[in-house]
Image: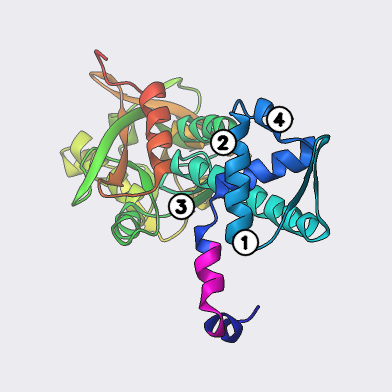
Amino acid sequence: MDNHSRRKNPSLLSRASAVDLQHLRYAIAAADHGSFRRAAEALVLRQSTLSRCIRQLEQTAGMVVFERSSGGVRTTSTGRDFIRAARSIVDQMDVLMASAYSTGRGDTGRLTIGFDTSLSVGNLRATLIEYARRFPEMDIGLIENSRARLAAKLRTGAIDLAVVIGEAAFPECRSMPLWSERILIVLPESHRLAADEIIYWTDLKGETLVLSQRDWGSEMQDLVIAKLISPEDRPKIVRHDISRESIKSLVAAGFGISLTLEASLGVNFAGVIHRDVRDGTGTNRVEYTAQWRGDSYNPALANFLRILEERYPLPGT
C-alpha cells in the first residue's frame, strides 16, 4: 500500500504499530504445531496465555487467523497469508537484531588501521592475522602513510587507529606502547663492511647514506646525527622522495648504503644484505605505539586494542 493510501486510512498504521512481535511468534508456533496446546508446551508457556495473545492478535489485525476445533487449529485461507508474512517479519527482525548485536560487540563492521611500517613480516602483520582469525566477519581497511598524514587522518576519523614509529602521542589522542624493532644497515653484497656480522656507527664514516625524505627517513637522519655528534664522523646523507623498498633498490645498484628496520626483512632484494648496527650500549632499536582517539564510537576498535594488550603487555602486567 502506498503512502497516499496510508494517509487515507490512518487506522492501518495504528493497528500495525499495536502488533506485538511476540504474538506473531506465538501464531507461527501454533501454525507449525497445529495446536495451541503443543505450541504452548514448545514455548514453555501456559496454553491460556498463548490462546489469549493470539486472540488479541486477531482482533488487532481484524481477521480470523485460525479455525479452532477439538482436534487442534488450522489457518484460514487469509490466515495462511498472514502467517507467511509474519514469518518473514520475524525472520528479518531476528537477522536485524543478530546483526546489531554482533556490530555492537565489534564482531562485525569495519576497522580502518593506518601504519608506517612494513607488512612483509613482523608484529603488525602477525597482529592483523590474529585479529582476522578471531573476527572473520570484520572488514579490515589498511592505509599506509607518513606519521604526519596518519595523525591528520586519525583526527578526521578517516582511520580508527594508527600504528607508528615513535613514543610521542598525537594531539588529543590516546596511545599504547607496542613493540620495538632493531635498526639494521642495508649494504650492497660487495661492500667492504659486508663481511662483518656487526657494524658500529663509527664504521659509517665516509659512506653515502641513502634515506627517504618521508617521516621514517627523517627519524633515521636524526638518529645518525645523535649517534655521530661530530660532523667529520658522519656519512654523507642523500635523501630521495621514494619508498623504503625503492631505497633498497638504490643500495643494490651501488648508490650507497641505508638504514632500515627488521620488519622490512620480508622484502627480499637481490644484491643487498642486512647487518646489525651498534654503539657502546649494544643493538639500537626504535619503539612503536598505537594511537587512537579516545572518543571513538567504533566497537571493533576495543577488540583490536584488546589483542594488542594481550600480545604486547606493559612490563609488570
Q: Mark 4 or mark 2, which is nearer the start of the sequence?
A: 4
Task: Measure the C-alpha gap from mark 1 to mark 2.
Answer: 18 Å
Q: Which residues are magenta?
A: 8-16
Q: Which mark is residue 37?
A: 4
Q: Quadrant of the C terminus?
A: top left
Q: Is residue 65 left or right of residue 303?
A: right
Please give the name of the residue rendered at 41% of the width and 31% of the height, measured from the top-left corner.
Answer: 184
Q: Mark 3 or mark 1, which is nearer the start of the sequence?
A: 1
Q: Which element is circle 2 on? A: helix
Q: Is residue 272 visible?
A: no
Q: Which mark is residue 49?
A: 2
Task: Measure the C-alpha gap from mark 4 to mark 3.
Answer: 62 Å
Q: Mark 4 or mark 1, which is nearer the start of the sequence?
A: 4
Query: Disc 1 marks which amino acid?
Result: Ala
229 or 183: which is nearer to us? 183
Task: Measure the C-alpha gap from mark 2 to mark 4.
Answer: 11 Å
